[in-house]
Amino acid sequence: MPPSPPRGIIDHRPRDFWSVKNHPLSGITTAQWARMLWRHGRSMDVFTYWPRLLFITCMSVLNSFFALCDWLFYGRAVRNQTINDEPVFVLGHPRTGTTHLHNLLSQDERFAFATTFSVGFPSGFLCLRAVAPVIGLLMDSTRPMDNMALAWDTPQEDELATNQMSSGTSPYAPLLFPRKEKAFRPFYRFLLAANGEEDGEDGEDADADPARVEDFERWKRAFTLFLKKTQYAAGGAHKRLLLKSPVHTARVAVLRRMFPKATFVFIHRHPLEVFRSAAHMADAYYWQCYLQKPSVLDVQEFILHQGAVLHRAYREDVAAMEAEERASGAKKNKPPGRVSVRFADLDADPVGTLRATYAALGWTEAFAKVEPAIERYSESLADFKKNAFGKEALSSEAESVVRRRWRAWFEDLGYE
């Protein structure tokens, strides 16, 4: 058994047992919900979360109707829809600035992206989109964890859709079932399904049992269907998909197999700042998601393990990518299919950092067209105040644990 993190290194106060706003299963269908109940129903805390469970069940009936409408009116068109084979993936651990970077890149009209509405109601959003502003009342106008603007048409994480459509075959499922967090670890990398190889690393931050082939296929079907619907809603394959989900950071190898021409934009931030922000996010938002009540240790371990596995997986996948490029004799003058961005640079100078990012990817001409939109968006954030975490926010005990568990992150990315 791995050593448990010390008690109390994060604050996680029980609340919001009856809340239904911003719930990540608001768009699940009856069939998807039934599969989730079959797999995890016995572990749900029914007497604690019965209002939320009732809400999800009622919504699933409504969602099933609109999913049927999507299938009747758009099914053939979606099935025949080609996915642009050059998607752009924004990568990075949660709380490293992936949303900020995603929002900035979304100002580029060359890109199509998933929206808060489409990921919230993935099975029926094509028919439901006419009433999206009304259904948007089910969410807050700002994100609970950091007060960033939240609207039905803002760019959003595609994995939120895949989690629903695959009935929880996702690393996001621990937000629902935090006591079963280890059961969902194979869904970060899908190692057995993707590579035919098991993860050989041992220790507290090793991957769990390899993913089953049927789990990988279930995730892949849901992911592909949602991308087809997103591409169709954007008017066709002429636009590149701009996709952002932090858990994709562990899937570079999988995503490259699916999209060999994909581009990856990786953003990183000081690990101690990330941990403070992740702990705040857990306390501010996770309680709105749970279907079983966690302990503080459950939540701490989820944050710590996720940080370790995302970094390790990204490091290994990029090393493999570089080895392939050397073996194939890739042209030295060819722009790379990946670039790294420091959050501190993006925060201090969004326009300049995006200009450098576009240049590194060989998109200089495109930046000249999008620069005015990026400047306008950046100016709109002038009054936005980030969460402030004082030095006292992280105890020496907590810092010691973070430095031990995320040591490779500190070393590889040059953080003190």
Image: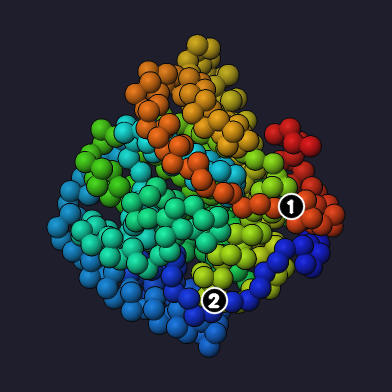
Q: Which residue is tagged 2? A: 16
Is 223 situated left or right of 348 in this image? Answer: left
Q: Which residue is tagged 1? A: 390
Is 346 situated left or right of 272 in this image? Answer: left
Q: Along the polypeptide, which appears first: circle 1 or circle 2?
A: 2
Residue 38 at what x, y percent from top left?
A: 45, 76
The residue sitting at 70% across, 34% down in the picture is 413
Q: Residue 315 carries which label?
A: none
Residue sticking out furthest to the front: 383
As helix, strand or loop, the secondary structure at mark 2 comes to loop
Of the residues shown, which amino acid type is indicated by label 2?
Asp
The residue sitting at 63% across, 55% down in the picture is 278
The residue sitting at 37% across, 55% down in the picture is 151
Work out whether residue 272 or residue 323 is closer to the camera in this orientation and state it. 272
Give the vertical position of 15 relative to 161 (above or below): below
Is 201 situated left or right of 176 in this image? Answer: right
Find residue 367 and report its image quarter.
top left
